[in-house]
Image (tube, rainbow, N blue to C red):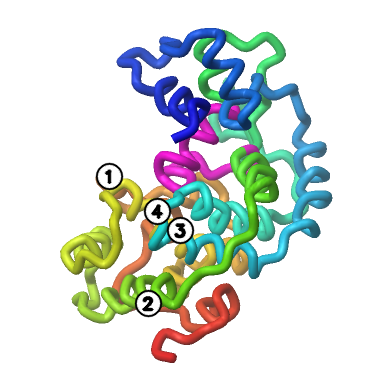
Amino acid sequence: MDEGLKSLFALYKGTRWSEINVSEDELSVAKRQGYLFDYPKFESHSESLNRRHDLLPKIDPKDIANAFLFSLSTRKLEYRSALGSYYFLNAVPEHDFMKSHNEKLAAAGVHCYLCGWTAWETIPSRQSVKSGYNFYNWLRYKYGGSTIGSLTINYALFDLERFLELPRVVPTEEDKRIFLEILSCAERLNSSDKAGKLRDAITKAKILKSNKDELSVLLGELGICGILAGNDFPSYDIYFANEYERDPTEYRNDFEYPLNRWHARDGINTVKLNAVFGFALNP
């Protein structure tokens, strides 16, 4: 493991969020190696939307799909993350800033409740520095993508810019086999079962090396791109739900939208599967 990657993981081992458990020299090395970053400069809501326009044409969706598959056998989670970010960012519509329903938060105007844009602080606190790009990169390497509530235009832009810096990869037949076995687990569920049961079935089948959190994110990304999304709560390209519409119906549901509304009876969206990965469930 690179020294910079060790520093990235070390940064988030503290019991207090504001703790910085990495020396200045280690921080400098990690920044040079591309694992840690300076706190981002302020970027307006409209500037973020324009940045999206510049970024998306540089990305081949085939590379996104290949990277996701490649991550399954290699467990290189940084290659997995871009799938959700790409299909989220690609679906973000042109829109005006959406204010909070809370009057105090709405007056502050630092967060868009449609795309998730959040204003970076001009004078960041020690805690804020830890919540910037470094936290995003930790999510990429730790879980293979955004965790529940962290998928925003800020995250997706950063994630895809880092994706463009990675070498292109080609998945193996083993990767495809793993992927199809993951999806086939949905066929063994009862119609009312939800994403948690699917995750349990995958874990029990021992299809790939993973853990509960990684599988939650992996399945969440398949929901974002529409493969694990039902007709009532479809993927973002069909209906871009705002943040108030994404909450699960149950309090204990640790999955990203729209997977948090998926049931086994919704099945696998084979049209999306073919569009995103280029092959059928039972080739």
Mark 1, Cα crowd under 10 Å, few <14 / some 14-19 / many 20+, is few
Proximity of marks 1 and 4: CB atoms separated by less than 8 Å? no
Label 3: which residue? 71
Q: Position of residue 189 (x, y in %)?
A: 21, 75
Which numbered disc, 2 or 1, marks the residue that appears first in the sequence?
2
Which numbered disc, 4 or 2, marks the residue that appears first in the sequence?
4
Among the 4 quarters of the image, the one containing residue 194: bottom left
Instruction: Determine the secondary structure under disc 4.
Output: loop
Label 1: which residue? 251
Mark 3, Cα crowd under 10 Å, few <14 / some 14-19 / many 20+, is some
Which numbered disc, 3 or 1, marks the residue that appears first in the sequence?
3
Query: Label 3 is placed on what type of residue?
Result: Ser
Spatial separation of the CA atoms under disc 3 and disc 1? 31 Å
Mark 4, Cα crowd under 10 Å, few <14 / some 14-19 / many 20+, is some
Instruction: Determine the secondary structure under disc 2.
Output: helix
Instruction: Determine the secondary structure under disc 3.
Output: helix
In magenta stretch: residue 142: yes
Q: Give the range drawn in magenta.
A: 133-154
Label 2: which residue? 177
Instruction: Determine the secondary structure under disc 1.
Output: loop
Label 4: which residue? 75
Q: Is residue 104 above or below residue 206?
A: above
Mark 2, Cα crowd under 10 Å, few <14 / some 14-19 / many 20+, is some
Residue at 69% in and 24% down: 40
Proximity of marks 3 and 4: CB atoms separated by less than 8 Å? yes
